[in-house]
Image: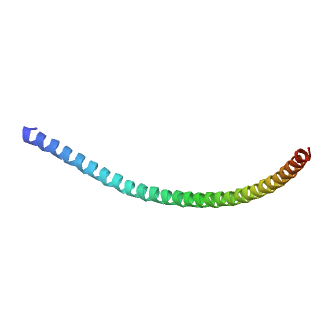
Amino acid sequence: MDMATALGMVGLGFGALSIVLGALSILLGFLGVRQGRRTDQVMASEGDKTRTLVGELRESTQALMASEGDKTRNLVSELHESTKAFIATLSTEHAEILKRFSAR
């Protein structure tokens, strides 16, 4: 075998190797595109789930805030009534004390 034949065989070997690597590259690119689509579908599905959970959380928070607001208004009303009764009692006792001192 002369030098030209040996170099031609080496060249053919490298050419075959580049064809195989090119085919492998195309196959991996195709699989990457398919995986990318699948990933997009999963992300869209998870986004929908997240939006649903956030909506439910918002609704329950608003209901809780409304409930607590009603409780707070009731407590303030009760405190106001108790304070008015206490002031009325103090006024009555104060008037009685003033009568006693003025009677002396």
**In the image, 9: left or right of 70?**
left
Q: Can residue 2 be seen in this view?
A: no
Q: Residue at x 60, y 57 (%)?
A: 53
Residue 29 in picture, x, y percent from top left: 34, 54
> For the image shown, how many numbered marks are present on the structure?
0
Along the line of sight, the residue nearer the viewer: 88 or 34: 88
Q: Position of residue 16 (x, y in %)?
A: 23, 48
* Front in this rendered view, residue 59 or 93: 93
Q: Position of residue 26 (x, y in %)?
A: 31, 55
In this rendering, is residue 90 above or below 63? above
- Which corner quadrant holds the C terminus? top right
**In the image, residue 83 lies at what x, y percent?**
79, 52
> Which quarter of the rendered picture does the N terminus lie within?
top left
Q: In this view, does 53 lie above or below 7?
A: below
Q: Which residue is drawn at 87% across and 52% down?
A: 92
Residue at the front extreme, as displayed = 104
Q: Please report the residue visible at 83 percent of the width from the left and 52 percent of the height from the top.
A: 91
Please indicate, yes or no, whether residue 63 appears anywhere in the rendered image.
yes
Q: Is residue 65 left or right of residue 44?
A: right
**Horizontally, is 96 left or right of 49 in the view?**
right
Could you tell me which residue is drawn at 88 percent across and 47 percent down? Answer: 102
Colouring rule applied to residues: rainbow
Q: Which of 12 and 32 is in front in this view?
A: 32
In the displayed structure, would residue 59 be above or below residue 6? below
- Which of these two is toward me, 69 or 45? 69
